[in-house]
C-alpha cells in the first residue's frame, strides 16, 4: 500500500474498468493507501504469466491491487486476498460483486494475513498487508507459501542508492532479507523516483 496511491489512480487515464471502480470505492471509503498505478500495471503483467495457477494477496485494501491482478489474470486462475479490516474487505467484495462473470474466480477474506497460507501454495504472492517482515512479525517462509517457480512481490520500498540499502540510518534488514534470500532469485524494480518493488522467484527446495 502506498501513500497517495488512491488519488494517483483517480487522475490516471486508461485504467481497466474494475481498477477504476475499486479506486473510486477506496476514495469513497477514505482509504488513500492503494497501490500506485505503476505497481498495479506490474501486478497485471505478472498475473498474466500465472495461467491456471493460484494468486494470493495480503492487504486487500478496497481492492485496487486485486483489480489489477484480476485484469491480468486468465479466466483459469484463482485469486484470494485477505485484509485485517472487515470494512475494507466488505468494500472490496462490493467492487467485485459487480464485475462480469466470465473472469477468474476471486475470494476476499477478512482476518489476519497469516490465514492466507491455508489457500496456498501460490504461483504469485503479493505481500502488501503482512508477511514482509517489516514490522514485529517475521517474514513468511517461502517454502510454505510458494510453489517452486512461484513469484513473491513486495512494494513500498524507495529505490536504494547505496549498498547495502539503508533505512533510518541502518542497513535495511527486511529488504536485504528478500534480496539475499538463498532460495529466491530476486531483484528490485524502480517504478517511479520514490517507489520500488521487489520481485523474487522461488527456486524450490535444494536438491
Image: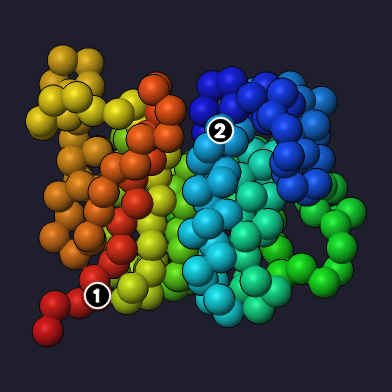
Residue at which label 1 appears: 204
Q: In this picture, is 157 found above or below 138?
A: above
* Residue 186, position as x, y percentages in the image: 25, 54
- x 22%, y 22%: residue: 167
Between 206 and 75, which is closer to the camera in this rendering?
A: 75
> Dot 2, how many residues are within 10 Å of its Cα: few (below 14), some (14-19), or many (20+)?
many
Mark 1 or 2: the one toward you: 2
- x 38%, y 57%: residue: 152
Q: Quadrant of residue 157?
A: top left
* Label 1 SS: loop
* Residue 85, position as x, y percentages in the image: 65, 38
Q: The C terminus lies in which quarter of the figure?
A: bottom left
Mark-to-mark CA distance, 1 and 2: 30 Å
Pick out the residue farthest to the bottom. 207
Q: In this picture, is 117 found above or below 9?
A: below
Q: In this picture, is 3 found above or below 139?
A: above
Left or right of 67? Residue 196 is left
Between 153 and 160, which is closer to the camera in this rendering?
A: 160
Count of numbered badges drawn on the protein: 2
* Residue 28, position as x, y percentages in the image: 82, 26
- x 36%, y 35%: residue: 190
* Residue 131, position as x, y percentages in the image: 39, 48
Q: Quadrant of residue 84?
A: top right
* Label 2 SS: loop
Residue 111 shows in the view: no
Q: In this picture, is 32 found above or below 127?
A: above
Residue at which label 2 appears: 36
Q: Are marks 1 and 2 in contact (CB under 8 Å)?
A: no
Amino acid at each position: 500500500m502506498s501513500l497517495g496511491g488512491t488519488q494517483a489512480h483517480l487522475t490516471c487515464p486508461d485504467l481497466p474498468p474494475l481498477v477504476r471502480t475499486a479506486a473510486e470505492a477506496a476514495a469513497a471509503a477514505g482509504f488513500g493507501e492503494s497501490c500506485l498505478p505503476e505497481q498495479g500495471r506490474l501486478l497485471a503483467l505478472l498475473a498474466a504469466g500465472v495461467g491456471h495457477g493460484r494468486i494470493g494477496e495480503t492487504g486487500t485494501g478496497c481492492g485496487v491491487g486485486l483489480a489489477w491482478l484480476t485484469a491480468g489474470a486468465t479466466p483459469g486462475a484463482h485469486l484470494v486476498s485477505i485484509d485485517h479490516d472487515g470494512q475494507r474487505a466488505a468494500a472490496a467484495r462490493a467492487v467485485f460483486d459487480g464485475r462480469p462473470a466470465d473472469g477468474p474466480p476471486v475470494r476476499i477474506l477478512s482476518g489476519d494475513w497469516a490465514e492466507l497460507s491455508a489457500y496456498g501454495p501460490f504461483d504469485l504472492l503479493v505481500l502488501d498487508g503482512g508477511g514482509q517482515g517489516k514490522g514485529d512479525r517475521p517474514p513468511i517462509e517461502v517454502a510454505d507459501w510458494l510453489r517452486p517457480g512461484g513469484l513473491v512481490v513486495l512494494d513500498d520500498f524507495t529505490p536504494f542508492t547505496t549498498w547495502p540499502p539503508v533505512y533510518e540510518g541502518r542497513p535495511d534488514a527486511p529488504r536485504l532479507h528478500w534480496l539475499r534470500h538463498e532460495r529466491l532469485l530476486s531483484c528490485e524494480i524502480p517504478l517511479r523516483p520514490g517507489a520500488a518493488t521487489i520481485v523474487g522467484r522461488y527456486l524450490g527446495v535444494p536438491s
